[in-house]
Image (spheres, coloured by chain):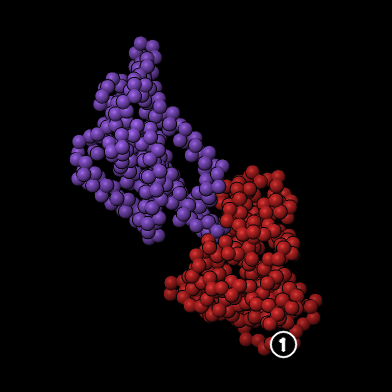
Chain colours: A red, B purple
């Protein structure tokens, strides 16, 4: 978050991805993607549908095998480590579509998350404190919850494992904007416990608001890597759609909060 | 009175069948494996018990203490090797593999133990006797014991699945094994535990059946002899 967190010499990256290439059958889903996530940071990966964002996160979590490249957690190579071992070592994914255990209650979902937990500040109690409504409804099946509530349970299930790096895959998927805002509003409280977050988001304005570092993917390639304060809306848009636009001067902070996508007037240029 | 008798005997025998079925159901529910060798594993459980009793002269009850953990261990190993390897290919492969396993077990048993039927004699008067309800209904203590065992096992299994840590993991893995991996759970290990439970219960059913068969052979006073049991004996 702070200046020193990003200093190249100040700290070693907590999570590092080197030249990662992933194939889905014949299709090259990711092409030599690299990223370095430093402790305490919120690193956002944006991009359109099919850009490879979820594939990148799932590969880091161990659910896809890369054809080339390596993944390092705190300097240790975890590329060949099984997904459940990565989880216990501190890489925990909140999967796309939430993927709660449907036949288990809210509390049982959290208990499963806590079964192989690392030592740390997060407990089921603490999750109940973070999401006030959850304690009362802990005996309910997750199918009875709204989408936003389910997403909260999915986040809670990941938090009780006390991850070092929390991977968030499309938190906003299928949720109303106000619910998305509320969930992202929880992020500072989560970060305050010393977590590092790597998130994937289609909602660019939301990602820009929370991120301390940004990478944009397009068809498996990196098209932009920067801090949100250093890039213009045009640059982000160009990277998002693959337009060839010259980098302009950095805008004032206020300008960045204008909606980029969806609802950007310049998006007509993409078609 | 004949139909009352039929119902009572039917329910008691149903307890044994439930004991047979719970492992099959658990394996299908958790890992979507239709274990076609399930019945053969029951017979193996029975034969292992006979072997142990013949060699060590342990009472039947004590042989259960040995055979059930032994079969559970076999279940864990088989799941982690053969069945998991076929699951990794496709669910349909497990059908072929367990069918193959069934053929191998049946012919192996025929080879080593011949086609003669065997039974375990309990040598216990209480177990081998029966009591009367009214003038026409005779109920074997053994059937009651087996029924009670089945009820205890099923209730225990239910309690284990709904309350214990591993029971919760088994249900979670059955729901979504990838999400369970994200929680740090090795689903293959959890599958192994489920298979161990399935093999343990089917071994118990196999032993119960062998004892019951002994009862049938030696006393032959059971009012109802379900066709299913005799058919099964002829096969093994």
Q: Residue at x 40, y 43 (%)?
A: B69
Q: For the image shown, how many numbered marks are present on the structure?
A: 1
Q: Residue at x 52, y 76 (%)?
A: A70
The quadrant holding residue B230 is: top left
The disc numbered 1 marks a residue on which chain?
Answer: A
- Residue name at image x 43 percent, y 32 percent: B150
**In-front residue for pair A15/A151:** A15
| On-image quarter of the N terminus of chain A | bottom right
In front here: A164 or B53?
Answer: B53
**Can you tell which quarter of the image residue A99 is in?**
bottom right
Q: Is residue B8 above or below residue B115?
A: above
Residue B213 position within the rendered picture, expressed as x and y whole percent measured from the top left: 29, 30
| Residues packed near mark 1 inside 10 Å, few (<14), some (14 to 19) or many (20 plus) | few
Residue B126 locus on image (x, y percent): 37, 21
State whether residue B118 is above or below residue A167.
above
**Residue B31, horizontal then vertical, whole percent:** 44, 51
Whether residue B149 appears in this view of the structure is yes
**Does residue B38 appear left or right of residue A191 in this picture?**
left
- On screen, residue A158 versus residue A132, left or right, reads left
Hey, which residue is sitting farthest bottom in the picture? A246
Q: Residue furthest top?
A: B135
Q: Is residue A163 above or below residue B72?
A: below
Judging from the image, what secondary structure is the residue with disc 1 in? loop
Residue at point 63%, 48% (across, down): A107
| Residue B211 to residue A202: above or below | above
Question: Residue beneath label 1, please?
Answer: A248
Give x and y (percent) for residue B89.
38, 60
Please identify the quarter of the rendering in which residue A233 is found.
bottom right
Asked whether residue A265 appears in the rendered view, the answer is no
**The C terminus of chain A - image quarter:** bottom right
């Amino acid at each position: 978050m702070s200046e020193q967190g990003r200093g190249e010499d100040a700290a070693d990256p907590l999570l590092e991805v080197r030249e990662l290439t992933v194939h889905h059958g014949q299709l090259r889903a990711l092409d030599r993607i690299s990223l370095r996530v430093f402790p305490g940071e919120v690193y956002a990966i944006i991009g359109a549908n099919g850009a490879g964002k979820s594939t990148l996160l799932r590969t880091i979590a161990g659910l896809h095998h890369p054809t080339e490249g390596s993944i390092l957690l705190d300097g240790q190579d975890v590329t060949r480590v099984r997904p459940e071992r990565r989880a216990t070592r501190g890489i925990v994914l909140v999967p796309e579509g939430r993927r709660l255990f449907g036949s288990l209650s809210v509390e049982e979902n959290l208990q499963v998350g806590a079964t192989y937990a690392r030592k740390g500040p997060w407990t089921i109690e603490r999750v109940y404190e973070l999401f006030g409504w959850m304690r009362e409804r802990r005996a309910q099946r997750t199918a009875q919850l709204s989408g936003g509530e389910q997403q909260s349970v999915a986040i809670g299930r990941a938090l009780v494992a006390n991850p070092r790096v929390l991977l968030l895959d499309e938190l906003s998927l299928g949720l109303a904007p106000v619910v998305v805002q509320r969930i992202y509003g929880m992020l500072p409280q989560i970060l305050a416990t010393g977590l590092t977050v790597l998130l994937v988001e289609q909602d660019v304005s939301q990602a820009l608001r929370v991120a301390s570092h940004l990478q944009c993917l397009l068809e498996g390639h990196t098209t932009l890597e920067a801090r949100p304060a250093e890039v213009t809306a045009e640059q982000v848009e160009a990277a998002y759609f693959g337009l060839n636009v010259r980098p302009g001067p950095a805008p004032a902070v206020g300008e960045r909060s204008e909606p980029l996508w969806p609802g950007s007037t310049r998006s007509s240029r993409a078609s | 009175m004949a139909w009352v008798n039929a119902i009572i005997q039917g329910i008691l025998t149903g307890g044994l069948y439930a004991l047979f079925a719970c492992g099959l159901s658990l394996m299908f529910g958790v890992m979507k494996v239709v274990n076609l060798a399930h019945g053969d594993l029951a017979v193996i459980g029975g034969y292992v018990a006979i072997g142990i009793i013949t060699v060590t002269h342990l009472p039947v009850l004590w042989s259960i203490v040995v055979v059930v953990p032994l079969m559970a261990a076999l279940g864990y190993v088989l799941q982690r090797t053969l069945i998991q390897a076929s699951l990794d290919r496709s669910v349909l492969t497990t059908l072929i593999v367990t069918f193959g396993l069934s053929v191998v077990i049946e012919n192996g048993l025929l080879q080593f133990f011949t086609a003669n039927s065997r039974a375990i004699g309990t040598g216990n008067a209480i177990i081998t006797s029966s009591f009367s309800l009214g003038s026409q209904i005779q109920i074997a203590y053994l059937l009651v014991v087996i029924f009670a065992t089945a009820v205890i096992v099923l209730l225990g299994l239910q309690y284990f699945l709904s309350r214990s840590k591993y029971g919760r993991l088994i249900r979670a893995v059955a729901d979504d094994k990838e999400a369970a991996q994200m929680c740090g759970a090795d689903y293959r290990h959890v599958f192994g535990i489920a298979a161990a439970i399935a093999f343990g219960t089917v071994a118990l059913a196999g032993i119960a059946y062998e004892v019951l068969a002994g009862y049938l052979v030696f006393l032959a006073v059971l009012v109802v002899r379900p066709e299913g049991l005799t058919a099964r004996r002829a096969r093994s």
